[in-house]
Each structure stands twice: as C-alpha cells, then as structure tokens.
Image: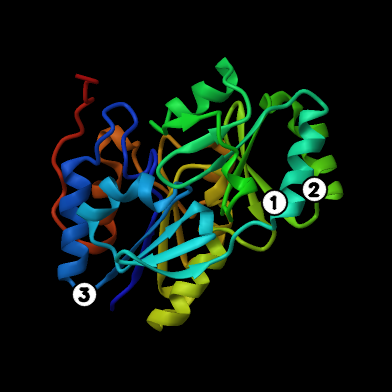
Amino acid sequence: MPRLFFFDLDNTLLDHRTLTIPPSALAAIDRLKRDGHTVAVATGRAHAHAKPFIDPLRPAYAITQNGACILRGDEIVLSRPLPRERLVALFDWMAARGHPHGVNGGASGYLSARTPMTTAALDTVAMPYQSERPIHLQRDVHQGWLFFDESLDADLLPTLRARFPEFEFFRWHRWAVDVQQQDVDKWTACQWVMARTGFGAEQAVAFGDGLNDVKMLQGVGLGIAMGNAHPALKAVADRIAPPIHLDGVARMLAELTGGADPGPAVEKSRD
C-alpha cells in the first residue's frame, strides 16, 4: 500500500560530519518512489539554503522553515510570513535584556551581533550571515532566531510565550532558538501536504532528530527518531532508527519496506 514519507534534513538525511546525504539514504529514497510511495522533505532551513540537498531527493513537496513555506519543485505553494511589527517588538524586548537576534533571509541570514554564540550556531548549518542589513525591517521573513543558552529555557521560554503569544519557539542549538508563527510548524505543513496528496495520517511516516520534529512524529501514523536524535524526540517516537552515520535511514526503510539492506554497519570517518 502506498505511503507518504516525511524526512527531516539536518542530522536525519544530511550528515553534519560530512555535509553530505549518505548514498545509502539516496538509494533507499529512490527505491521508495519507484515502489509508488510519495516523499516529502520537512526542514527548518529556508529553501535556498536547503536546495543543494533537496534537489537530489526530488521530493513531491519541500516543507521549509519549519512549515512556514512549502514548495512543489521551485514553486511556492504556501507562505506564512511572521507578523513584522510583533517580530520587531520581540527583538527589541530581547535586546533590552542582552540577547541577540537574527532572521533567516533564505540564502543567508542577518545577525544583530556577531558573537561566538550567534556565529557558532549558524556555522553548524553552514549558513552565511551579515550584520549590516536588518532585512526583516524591509520585507517579510518566515523565520527568526533568538540566541541564549539552553540553561535559560525553563524561565525564559514560558515568559516569551506569555508575552508574545503569536509566536512559538523551537530550540535547535544549545545557543539558538527558532521563532515561528504560532500554529505554524512542520506538523501543520504535513497536514497541508496530506490534504493535497490524499493520504491520511495513518498512512504517513516521518523521520526526524530534533525538537522541531516532535509534533510531526506524534502526528503521523509511524514516527521514527534517529539514533542520534534528541532524547525528548526519542521519548515520543514509535521506532528508533540507527544513527545517521550508520546508514540509519536506509536500514529503517529496508526494515519497513523489505528493501535491500545497505550491508554491515561501519563507522564512517569524517574524511
């Protein structure tokens, strides 16, 4: 029976140790499509930033910026930008408390300050950045960033949600949090894709590794966390795949569909 597969990108398909998608995962996804299944990508990246990795996958849909922008090929089919005035108010409130901010501009980002905290987070996803042009003051954006240590989450995140209820906040790095529009996330985007492709949630499978994948894995019929996933995601997953560097996607797909196993697990070097 055909199914709909959603794949997160970073640290699920895209190995950050090599900045490549393992050939085993590419082959396994090609096999899924040949067998009549539908494949979609669901990433926190903007499309321009993710395009070099999305294009080889040739997905039916690309959910980008945590669900705020959905593309079919290179065509935007759904766009949910952040409310500009409230975003500026949020950034001003955080700046008064000593916390820098930024926005995802697509191919590159804006940072209010270049500090080890802000640049280290963007460097992990090879995102170019500049600090001269606050692009969110001139045009709509779909994703903002706040930078503060995760040790502040217990106190600061509830305060932010109470003061700025139009936003939701997803941590993706120990020093960085995504700012999204409330009620816009990967799962709402998955539901939009399911409505257009005719699949029900029980026919959908999702792979992920991060906190922004929680609702997606909980919503689909089968939620799969990578072996390298955040512990909180593993706690809600139906299955745990091997880590990305041990061909986790290919191994789990072989188990689910009866496809070819990629062979004995071998620890891959960074070189």
Rounded to the nearest angstrom, the CA distance separating label 1 from label 2 is 7 Å
Rounded to the nearest angstrom, the CA distance separating label 1 from label 3 is 36 Å
Q: Is residue 20 above or below residue 215?
A: above
- The amino acid type of the residue labelled 3 equals Gly
Quadrant position of residue 144: top right
Quadrant location, the C terminus? top left
Question: Farthest residue toward the top?
Answer: 116
Residue 71 x/y as whole percent = 39, 65
Quadrant location, the N terminus? bottom left
Quadrant position of residue 247: top left
Of callouts 3 and 2, which one flags the residue occurring earlier in the amino acid sequence? 3
Residue to which mark 3 is pinned:
36
The answer to whether residue 9 is seen in the rendering is yes
Question: Farthest residue toward the bottom?
Answer: 198
- The amino acid type of the residue labelled 2 equals Arg
Residue 265 x/y as whole percent = 20, 33
Q: Nearer the viewer, mark 1 or mark 3?
A: 1
Q: Are marks 3 and 2 in contact (CB under 8 Å)?
A: no
Which mark is drawn over residue 161? 2
Q: Secondary structure at mark 1?
A: strand
Residue to which mark 1 is pinned:
168
Q: Residue at x 30, y 42 (%)?
A: 248
> What is the crowding at mark 2: few (fewer than 14 residues within 10 Å), some, or many (at least 20)?
some
Q: Are marks 1 and 2 in contact (CB under 8 Å)?
A: yes
Q: Secondary structure at mark 3?
A: loop
Of callouts 1 and 3, which one flags the residue occurring earlier in the amino acid sequence? 3
> What is the crowding at mark 1: few (fewer than 14 residues within 10 Å), some, or many (at least 20)?
some
Residue 59 x/y as whole percent = 28, 63
Q: Is residue 84 above or below residue 38?
A: above
Q: Residue at x 58, y 57 (%)?
A: 215
